[in-house]
């Protein structure tokens, strides 16, 4: 049987574990989602920032290149070349243009190459020799006047060992006639310091990727130029549209990141963070929570044990006290130590014990009275009311027992049958009260004359029987003689009315043929009869004394 205490503890632990476990799981999921959200927001802000830097870089360089494309040496040079493409003048113009481009390029760090093309899309001058040809559009888009046209998407340029971007601008004469094109190759690597600036307040890493996922530029060094994002992951990131996902990243084996497609330059901005950092934070949170739940369970268990103790201990005292009552100890009284239900139960228990004690005492008194009455009744049932001697029915029982002893052990005994002579006359002459007094006197003498092992009984009227155990006929006769003389003596000494009282006494010793008390009585009655017949006031012992 499980104790109340252990039941309370089990309940308390379950009652703590279930809600805290449920809340814990819920909060783990929520925290994970919140952390992912928060990291996504941070990465989004970082990507926005990178995009702004990218746009600013492009604007700044576009403005600078546009200024160059609209500079006098370029417009005038190209206008002159359009008028005379050959000859000394043309060579001179080309040479001047090349010198101009070299001098300008030297002043701008971002620019790797500058080139000028004529209307036939033939390069007429460049800042560096052996330049690769630019893709000059046949039809210029309208915005190319201000923003230029991208000649080729950004890519790795082995010659300069950096990612580059080439832009071409149309060159118009002063009277707005297309006279050629101005091409520039920009060093994307010059953006790196700005990328590092952008990630100052973020733990994320930045990658500029081409449309195939190859890394053009990054905030951390990459192992090789061929490092690229898996095409499937690239596709998934594009599909997510600025929303984060967890994947095998470029910076970390397990990354959380998102992808922005730049609107002005055909590059993708990838920002990513180490997902293990988030897991570590999450694990820390989980460990804190488990510690907290552990402490709560210990406290709850301690409180439950204390509560169980406060309930079980008084209950045990009540059980012990109840056991005591079952065993008859009504003196138990419990101390009331609490004011709660257990305290009330203890008060009720004490009241119940008091009531039981009172009832028990009453029952004990009633029992005692009844026992006394029973003893009295028992005594009365075997006693003669006038003389206090045994009555006739008790005499029968005594004789039956003595006969049995005699038959069993040959323990002899004698009977005396005593009769007051002429008692009728005494009654008639002196009245019944005097008659009673004489009967009581005879009884008193009988009791005084016999031993504690002998018996005296009133047989009826003025007749008495004495049973002398372990006594033979000689000794019985002597006792009878003593009784006779003693009664005479006492009655002669009555103060109010001295009287001569004589007794006739028959004596008989038990014999083997005495089978019943009636046989014995008949035997001794015969002896008494002989005494009466012989003149009264005498003792007669009849029958052979046989052993
Ligand atoms: N006072 C008194 N008298 C009793 C009591 N019981 C019996 N008696 C009387 O005792 C008397 C007995 O008389 P009997 O049996 O004739 O014997 P007796 O007069 O002694 O004659 P013997 O025995 O031949 O000498 C009767 O008169 C009874 O009424 C008693 O309790 N008190």
Image (cartoon, grey):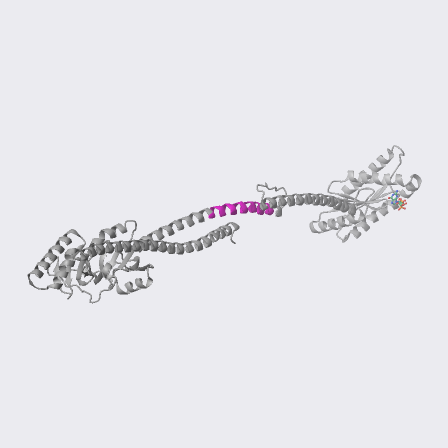
In this rendered view, identify the residue nearer to me: 91 or 292.
91
Q: Position of residue 81 (x, y in %)?
A: 12, 62
Is residue 135 placed above or below 303 in the rendered structure?
Answer: below
Can you give x and y, in whole percent of width and height, for residue 250 in the image? Answer: 25, 58
Q: Is residue 114 visible?
A: no
Kindly report the secondary structure that dominates the magenta region of the rendered protein.
Answer: helix
Q: In the displayed structure, does residue 91 sit left or right of residue 366?
A: left
Give the residue displayed 73% in from the left and 41% down from the top: 452
Q: Is residue 80 visible?
A: yes
The residue at the far front in this view is: 175
In the figure, residue 27 lies in which quadrant?
bottom left
For this rendering, which residue is in front, 291 or 100? 100
Task: Find residue 431 and report its horizontal and vertical position in percent.
Answer: 91, 40
Q: Residue 396 vs residue 96: left or right?
A: right
Q: Is residue 231 above or below residue 457?
A: below
Q: Which residues are magenta?
A: 300-324
Left or right side of 117 for 529: right
**Residue shown at 42%/50% (left/top)?**
293
């Amino acid at each position: 049987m499980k104790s109340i205490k252990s039941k309370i503890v089990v309940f308390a632990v379950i009652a703590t574990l279930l809600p805290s476990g449920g809340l814990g799981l819920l909060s783990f999921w929520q925290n994970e989602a919140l952390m992912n959200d928060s990291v996504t927001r941070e990465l989004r802000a970082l990507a926005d920032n990178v995009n702004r830097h990218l746009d600013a870089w492009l604007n700044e360089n576009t403005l600078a290149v546009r200024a160059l494309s609209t500079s006098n040496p370029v417009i005038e040079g190209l206008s002159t070349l359009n008028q005379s493409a050959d000859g000394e003048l043309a060579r001179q113009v080309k040479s001047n243009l090349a010198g101009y481009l070299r001098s300008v390029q030297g002043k701008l760090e971002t620019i790797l190459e500058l080139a000028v093309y004529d209307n036939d899309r033939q390069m007429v001058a460049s800042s560096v020799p052996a330049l690769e040809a630019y893709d000059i559009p046949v039809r210029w888009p309208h915005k190319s006047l201000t923003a230029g046209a991208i000649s080729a998407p950004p890519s790795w340029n082995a010659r300069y060992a950096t990612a580059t971007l080439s832009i071409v601008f149309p060159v118009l004469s002063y009277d707005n006639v297309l006279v050629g094109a101005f091409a520039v190759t920009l060093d994307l690597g010059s953006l790196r310091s700005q990328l590092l600036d952008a990630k100052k307040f973020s733990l994320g890493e930045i990658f500029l990727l081409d449309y195939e996922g190859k890394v053009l530029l990054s905030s951390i060094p990459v192992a090789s130029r061929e490092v690229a994002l898996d095409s499937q992951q690239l596709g998934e990131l594009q599909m997510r549209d600025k929303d984060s996902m967890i994947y095998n990243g470029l910076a970390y084996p397990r990354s959380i990141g998102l992808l922005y497609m730049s609107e002005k330059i055909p590059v993708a901005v990838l920002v990513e963070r180490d997902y293990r950092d988030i897991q570590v934070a999450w694990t820390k949170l989980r460990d804190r929570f488990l510690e907290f739940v552990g402490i709560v369970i210990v406290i709850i268990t301690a409180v439950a044990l204390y509560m169980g103790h406060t309930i079980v201990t008084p209950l045990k005292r009540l059980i012990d006290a109840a056991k005591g009552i079952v065993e008859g100890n009504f003196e138990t009284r419990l101390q009331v130590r609490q004011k709660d239900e257990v305290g009330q139960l203890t008060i009720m228990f004490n009241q119940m014990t008091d009531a039981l004690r009172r009832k028990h005492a009453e029952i004990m008194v009633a029992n005692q009275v009844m026992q006394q009455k029973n003893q009295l009744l028992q005594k009365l049932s075997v006693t003669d009311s006038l003389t206090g001697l045994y009555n006739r029915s008790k005499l029968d029982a005594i004789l039956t027992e003595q006969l049995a002893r005699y038959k069993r052990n040959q323990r002899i005994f004698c009977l005396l049958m005593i009769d007051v002579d002429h008692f009728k006359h005494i009654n008639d002459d002196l009245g019944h009260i005097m008659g009673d007094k004489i009967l009581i006197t005879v009884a008193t003498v009988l009791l005084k004359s016999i031993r504690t092992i002998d018996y005296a009984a009133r047989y009826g009227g003025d007749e008495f029987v004495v049973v002398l155990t372990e006594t033979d006929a000689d000794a019985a006769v002597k006792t009878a003689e003593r009784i006779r003389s003693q009664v005479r003596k006492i009655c002669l000494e009555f103060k109010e009315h001295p009287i001569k009282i004589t007794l006739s006494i028959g004596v008989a010793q038990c014999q083997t043929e005495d089978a019943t008390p009636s046989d014995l009585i008949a035997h001794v009655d015969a002896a008494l009869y002989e005494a009466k017949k012989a003149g009264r006031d005498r003792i007669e012992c009849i029958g052979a004394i046989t052993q």
